Image (cartoon, rainbow, N blue to C red):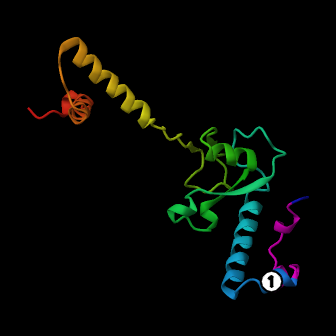
Amino acid sequence: MAYEVYKTIKSFDKYFSEWKISDINNLTNELKIQVYKRYVFKCEVFQRDNFMCQNTECKFPDSPLTLHHIKFKKNNGEDKLRNGITLCKTCHMGYHKAKRALIFHNENNVPSHIRGHIFKLEKPIKIDWKQIKSDMKDLRKQLRDNHGIIITLRQLSLLMRFITVPYNEWDD
């Protein structure tokens, strides 16, 4: 099995004894500790999840396994068993590209705070500011030519903001 290294948690010394000397010499003691803790974390998560993707909608059981942080590392998510879940690479990448939802099993091996939950990222809306500016310019031209109304870009911008406020938020 490709995940043999994660089946048992090796001691710190045993783990690094299998590394090349040149690779070990490039690491500080603090970095070694960090690498080892990450290895232990991955072992614990993979073992808890029986080396299977935990997404119930997974259609790619042969895809390589990855470790997913429920609370992202960039949002101060920690390497704790409660914050890790095993996903196949296809499900993991699909989730991060906002193409796939993660639906977790309602079983004991899944952390209790995500059991049965669905997670989905939304694609950010990309705004084409050049197109908007061009459209506003065309609108100003139409107002000037058809109705004799001269309006500045700033005035048009304020008007656009005004009409987007829901009527129930207007002050009476």
| Stretch in magenta | 3-20
Whole-percent x, y for residue 91 in the image: 70, 44
Residue 158 is left or right of residue 117, and the answer is: left
- The residue at which mark 1 appears reads as 24
> Going 64% across and 65% down the picture, which residue do you hit?
81
Can residue 103 be seen from the camera position used here? no
Determine whether 81 is above or below 129 in the image: below
Residue 110 is left or right of residue 51, and the answer is: left
User: For the residue marked with disc 1, what is the amino acid?
Assistant: Ile
Residue that protrudes farthest toward the left in the picture: 172
Q: In which quarter of the image is the C terminus?
A: top left
Q: What secondary structure is marked by label 1?
A: helix
> Going 61% across and 68% down the picture, which residue do you hit?
80
Determine whether 59 is above or below 86 in the image: above
Whole-percent x, y for residue 29 in the image: 70, 88
Can residue 53 be seen from the camera position used here? yes
Q: Quadrant of the N terminus?
A: bottom right
> Going 57% across and 63% down the picture, which residue do you hit?
73
Whole-percent x, y for residue 102 in the image: 63, 43
